[in-house]
């Protein structure tokens, strides 16, 4: 596999993921990809985890071809995903959550869009099965705001399951403003914020890239990293920052 061009790169950000690794999510990812006819790689990007996450991931990598670990300083999920996307070598580059709320096998629904000429494909969670009511209310309110402020034509911008042609990855992720700024400072906690996905998709729109949105399977995993008031406020601030950066011409081609 190392001698042939890589077709699919999978970027998995990781912060304090000991439980998910121990319950076998990486084995599941490996089993799925090993059965595919194309070449692939998996980049596990550790976000400076203070626990055994990186060590466990490296132990896994030693016995599983196609996987590698990137140890990054703690700067939040946005900066971690950026680092992984820019390090990926695949013709198609996907980022997906470690908890596999959207199983990796759902990539089968995204890949045909690239054959049809799309530059990027985003997963869309229909109904958010199992999510608490507060998460659904937050999602609805944020959808209204992002439509008004950024005019992004998507049903679900926040699903952590998105893929892009490798050729356009540097143009998108190299233009990130909010999260490249944050990557230069150490983050607090998991630092999961809504603005990351908004900035990615807004830049793709400014670049006139052809994007598709595809319904994918998604199951709530009971994360404790979402704080309704704090994260809603941060998401609103990020949304406004994207608009301010756009007015200032920071996303210009």
Image (spheres, rainbow, N blue to C red):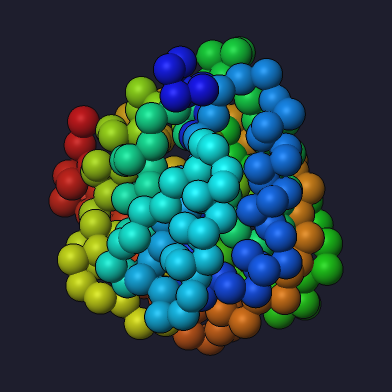
Badge count: 0
Q: Residue at x 67, y 68 (%)?
A: 22
In percent of width and height, residue 44 lies at 47, 53
220 in relation to 30, above or below: below
Q: Residue at x 54, y 38 (%)?
A: 65
Residue 24: image quadrant is bottom right
Is residue 201 visible in the rendered image? The answer is yes
Q: Residue at x 72, y 67 (%)?
A: 23
Q: Residue at x 21, y 31 (%)?
A: 253
Between 87 and 236, the residue placed more toward the observer is: 87
Would residue 24 appear left or right of 251 to someone viewing this image?
Answer: right
In percent of width and height, residue 61 lies at 51, 50
In percent of width and height, residue 184 lies at 18, 66
Between 73 and 150, the residue placed more toward the observer is: 73
Would residue 239 appear left or right of 148 to someone viewing this image?
Answer: left
Between 156 and 129, the residue placed more toward the observer is: 129
In percent of width and height, residue 173 lies at 31, 43
150 in relation to 90, above or below: below
49 in relation to 181, above or below: below
Is residue 233 visible in the rendered image? The answer is no
85 in relation to 5, above or below: below
Residue 219: image quadrant is bottom right
Would residue 185 appear left or right of 30 to someone viewing this image?
Answer: left
Between 10 and 24, the residue placed more toward the observer is: 24
């Amino acid at each position: 596999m190392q001698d042939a061009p890589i077709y699919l790169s999978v970027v998995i950000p990781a912060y304090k993921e000991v439980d998910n690794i121990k319950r076998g999510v990486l084995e599941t990812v490996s089993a799925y990809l090993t059965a595919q006819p194309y070449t692939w790689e998996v980049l596990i990007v550790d976000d400076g985890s203070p626990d055994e996450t990186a060590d466990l991931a490296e132990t896994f990598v030693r016995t599983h071809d196609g996987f590698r670990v990137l140890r990054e300083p703690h700067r939040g999920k946005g900066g971690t995903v950026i680092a992984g996307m820019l390090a990926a070598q695949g013709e198609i580059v996907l980022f997906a959550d470690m908890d596999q709320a959207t199983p990796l096998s759902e990539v089968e629904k995204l890949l045909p869009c690239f054959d049809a000429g799309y530059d990027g494909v985003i997963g869309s969670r229909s109904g958010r099965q199992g999510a608490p009511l507060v998460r659904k209310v937050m999602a609805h309110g944020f959808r209204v705001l992002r439509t008004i402020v950024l005019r992004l034509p998507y049903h679900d911008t926040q699903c952590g399951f998105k893929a892009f042609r490798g050729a356009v990855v540097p143009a998108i992720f190299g233009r990130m403003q909010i999260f490249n700024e944050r990557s230069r400072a150490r983050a607090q906690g998991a630092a999961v914020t809504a603005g990351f996905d908004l900035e990615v998709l807004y830049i793709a729109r400014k670049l006139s890239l052809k994007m598709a949105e595809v319904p994918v399977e998604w199951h709530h995993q009971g994360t404790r990293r979402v704080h309704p008031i704090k994260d809603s406020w941060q998401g609103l601030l990020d949304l406004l920052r994207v608009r301010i950066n756009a007015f200032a011409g920071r996303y210009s081609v």
